[in-house]
Image (cartoon, helix red, strand yellow):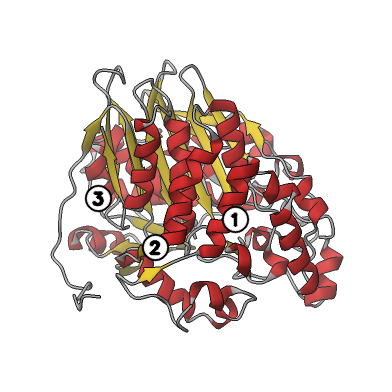
Amino acid sequence: MSSFDYRSGYPSTRLPVFARNLVATSHPLAVQAGLKMLQAGGNAVDAAVAAAAVMTIVEPCSNGLGSDAFCILWDGRRLVGLNASGRAPAAWTPDYFRRQHGVDATRPPQRGWDSVTVPGAVAGWMGLSERYGKLPFGDLLAPAIDIAERGYAVPVVVQQKWAAASRVEALASQPGFAPTFLPRGRAPAVGELFRMPGAARTLRAIAATRGEAYYRGEIAAALARQAREQGGAITADDLAAYRPEWVDPIARRYRGHVLHEIPPNGQGIAALIAAGILAHFDVAALPVDGVASQHLQIEAMKLAFADTYRYVAEPASMEVTAEQLLDDAYLAGRARLIDPKRAQDFGAGNPAKGGTIYLSTADESGMMVSFIQSNYMGFGSGVVVPDYGLSLQNRGHGFSLRAGSANLVAPGKRPFHTIIPAFLSDADGAPRMSFGVMGANMQPQGHLQTLVRMVDYGQQPQAACDAPRWRYNAGLEINVEAGMAPATVQGLAALGHRMEVIQDSYQDFGAGQFIWRLGDPGSEGYVAASDPRRDGQAAGF
């Protein structure tokens, strides 16, 4: 292995990519897997599934074979959503967690078996392939199997996250974690070869059975057996009962376009609320990187989160509907709360009166896919079924144990979710862009900031992706990226924003992939962008 210093370098500019068939992900090997499917006669769905499978191997600190997933796709005629987030095991109740973790517990733990809901990503791949794919399902997993068996050189940004996770004792001590992800007693170095033979075994079984082995066969049995032996509640029956759900995306008009998100149990509605509030201001009249524009966006996002955290959960548990949260009159009232001259700490309104990877694909037939899958907190629960390379998410930590909470845990219920694919159409319904920005609660914030740059200011997708971002945390606290203009940082501070200027290439400011339709996909094609904050790229032909 070379002795290069991978930390050193100079600022570089990525250029937008133009093609009729495109794949954009945060790892080049996943891009190549997607392109291989397109070149073999597959469509954008085939490309997305192949890329998603590879991502579980090459970016395991963000997602894995035990992840959840969501998708929005334009099938050539209409927009369709898929919710492949997992449900709580049948044994999970508030009393279960109090017995396991003490009477003072307010939510399930962050790590271990009691943070694991039924993984949904593989079922999502199966559903997408069955309904929309052109190639045999097994063909889609071949690139991931090859990479898992032969290994790959660990890239720069992924290695940073991997190394940080290995220092978290609660994670590294989980069953199966160290043998799988710290094979030499440490995280791999940049450029070091890493293999996942167990994951190759799992992928082969999934490919051979069209996923049945995962939910009703040998993989399900192994997962349930390890859970039983190590005190987990998830069973073979929980896995066998799982099905992803096809849904209609929810939407909000914005400046002659329509922004689409997956409905709750996810936080995509936060981006719609913020866009609906911001639509009441003439943002385009303000300098794109100036204080006034950034302040309005931050305040709109704060209002959106106040309502999202108060009301959003599994739809059957919500006391208000998505339609009420997106009501024109309600959002106009929320917009009036914004003071252009000072930062505020907002509470929720009353609308009743009225660790992740993202990828995008598109093909010349017009099909466009916006897909996201995640473990949640980096490596997720930390629990791994070693012989199968099966690392499990920790989405159960999104539940509450507080009586009266919309997110109160219950058997078979889905928790509040952070991962959200997005899609933009024209006002007449024509498809325009499949996009997403990964990174916990940065996701709707990234949706809003990049949308404003492209729609209000006409910035091309790569420029909108490259631009410095802010991230709202809580109260008056925000983070701003080190590349933001000092005058803007000072101006926001003068308005009362409490700021920390930081540079984190992995999660703090998210990482996006964007594919914008230029016209007829068979002739003009698309323009794509990939976030420089990750190791990936956009590529096409």
Identify residue type, mark 3. Asp
Please rate how many residues cluster around mark 1, counting C-alpha atoms within 10 Å: few if below 14, some from 14 to 19, many from 20.
many
- Counting from the top left corner in percent of width and height, residue 350 is at 65, 43
Displayed quadrant of residue 10: bottom left
- Tell me the mark number nearer the camera, choosing from 1 and 3: 1
- Counting from the top left corner in percent of width and height, residue 172 is at 55, 79
Q: Which one is nearer the viewer's eye here, 130 or 352?
A: 130
Q: Say which element carries label 1.
A: helix
For disc 3, the marked residue is 466
Looking at the rendered structure, which numbered label has been put on residue 202? 1
Looking at the rendered structure, which numbered label has been put on residue 508? 2
Q: Is residue 405 left or right of 436 when viewed as pictured?
A: right
Q: Which one is nearer the viewer's eye here, 56 or 526?
A: 56
- Counting from the top left corner in percent of width and height, residue 411 is at 82, 53
Q: Is residue 349 visible?
A: no
Identify residue type, mark 1. Thr
State the residue at coordinates (72%, 43%).
318
Kindly report the distance in space between the C-alpha atoms of the residues bearing marks 3 and 2: 14 Å
Please rate how many residues cluster around mark 3, counting C-alpha atoms within 10 Å: few if below 14, some from 14 to 19, many from 20.
many
Kindly report the distance in space between the C-alpha atoms of the residues bearing marks 1 and 3: 37 Å
Q: Say which element carries label 3.
A: helix
- Tell me the mark number nearer the camera, choosing from 1 and 2: 1
Q: Is residue 37 left or right of 314 when viewed as pictured?
A: left
Q: Say which element carries label 2.
A: loop
- Going from N to C along the chain, the mark reached first, 1 or 2, is 1
